[in-house]
Image: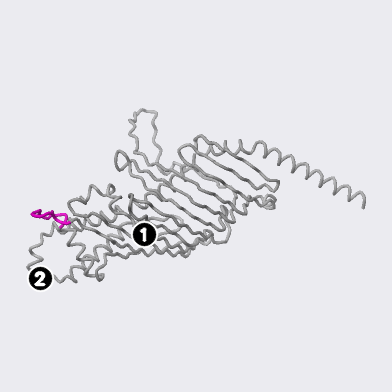
Amino acid sequence: MNKIERTIGSVLISLAILFGLVYLFLLITGKAIITQEIENLTHKKVSIEYFNLSPAFNLELKNLKVEGLAKIKSVSVSSNLLSFFTGRLIFNSVKIVSPEFTFVKAPHAVVAEEKTSKDAILPAALVKPKEIKLLPIGFRRIIVENGTVNYIDQTIRANGIKIVLKNISCKIISLYFYPRPIATSFELKGKIPWREGQDSGQVSIDGWINFFKKDMKVVLKIKDIDAVYLSPYYATWIDLEKARIEKAKLNFTIDANGLNNNINADCHLELTDMVRKPLEPGQGEEKASKLTNKVLDMFKAVDQGKVELNFSIKTKLDSPQFGFGTFKGAFDEKISQGLGALNPKPENVLALPLKIMENGVRSFTDLTRAMIDGVFAIGGEVVKAGKNTSQQ
């Protein structure tokens, strides 16, 4: 027994020494390793003001900065040491306090291409997409407090248009980057400040996704979208000044349900708080204003004074697509219902030029589409930026 005990004791002492050496190595070099890894990932200068690693391998960072991309007040990571023996890296919890991310969409640069005999263009079928190999990492809980996302779109106008999502609180439970039959639940809330002196927009998302079974249930709500603030997105389609639109807000809701990779998303769009500029004495009404009046009257005639639209989108969980044809079909149907509800007299229908009516409907459709595009642009660019960063 004494020999066995001595052997076990020697093994334990060796493991303790090895553990101590690894801990000291990471305690001394961990800050440099993390800084270098983030720089390799983002290709930007990184600085960390404070770094600490406990003997239980719990990590704490303060004042992490990625030049031009992110500033984070503090990051706390609680590790699961037993997961090391399974070949996977599991974190019990990650808490991120006051992160601020900035994403800029710049105009595409026009580069002159020289065509030479060496410029061989491979067929699309022969071009292999770059594979992204994710480490077997899992997070039992991720918490974000007081976050901010800045999205600056420089493709719309010279000085750009900025959309900010602030006061972000987010909680994610059971997020694993390897196959596991468990649902990932999440909830997020935030505010979108528009122009000074106006109410902020409200954003919330709540639900769960089972990536293994490809099932889901997600509800997204965006309230008080400032349509006037986003007017640069649809300035080529409609002139707010001529349409006499001084103020308008949009509410948008998506209730998405998925089963076996098939998703059905019920969407609700509502225009509220529209304020029209009064006509000056002796001022004639522009054609754009008359068309706006006509379309609004059609909607209100159908929905008891409201301006709203309901439509559904069918897509796939592993390749989600937002087709605007569904929205246009629902809009056309609502216009038809509005014409029937107004019950125009035959002579009034003949007096209304068909081409003008078509232009009015098309402009209003483009207006609503552009406002939705403007709001969802921030989400799309954040996802795109994350993918591009992971591929570099």
Q: Quadrant of residue 173?
A: bottom right
Question: What SS does tag 1 mark?
Answer: strand
Residue 147 location, x and y as percent?
48, 50
Report the magenta residues as a range: 278-289
Disc 1/disc 2 C-alpha distance (Å): 38 Å
For disc 2, the marked residue is 345
Q: Quadrant of residue 110?
A: top left
Q: Dominant secondary structure of the magenta stretch? A: loop
Residue plotted at (62% across, 40% down): 51
Task: Depth check: give the residue in front, 184 or 62.
Answer: 62
What type is the residue that disc 1 sits on?
Answer: Lys
- Closer to the chain start, of discs 1 and 2, is 1
Q: Is residue 348 left or right of residue 105?
A: left
Residue 255 on the magenta segment: no
In the image, is residue 265 above or below residue 387? Answer: below
Q: Residue furthest front?
A: 197
Residue 210 location, x and y as percent?
52, 61
Question: What SS does tag 2 mark?
Answer: loop
What type is the residue that disc 2 sits on?
Answer: Lys
Mark 2 residue crowding within 10 angstroms, few (<14) / some (14–19) / many (20+): few
For disc 1, the marked residue is 223
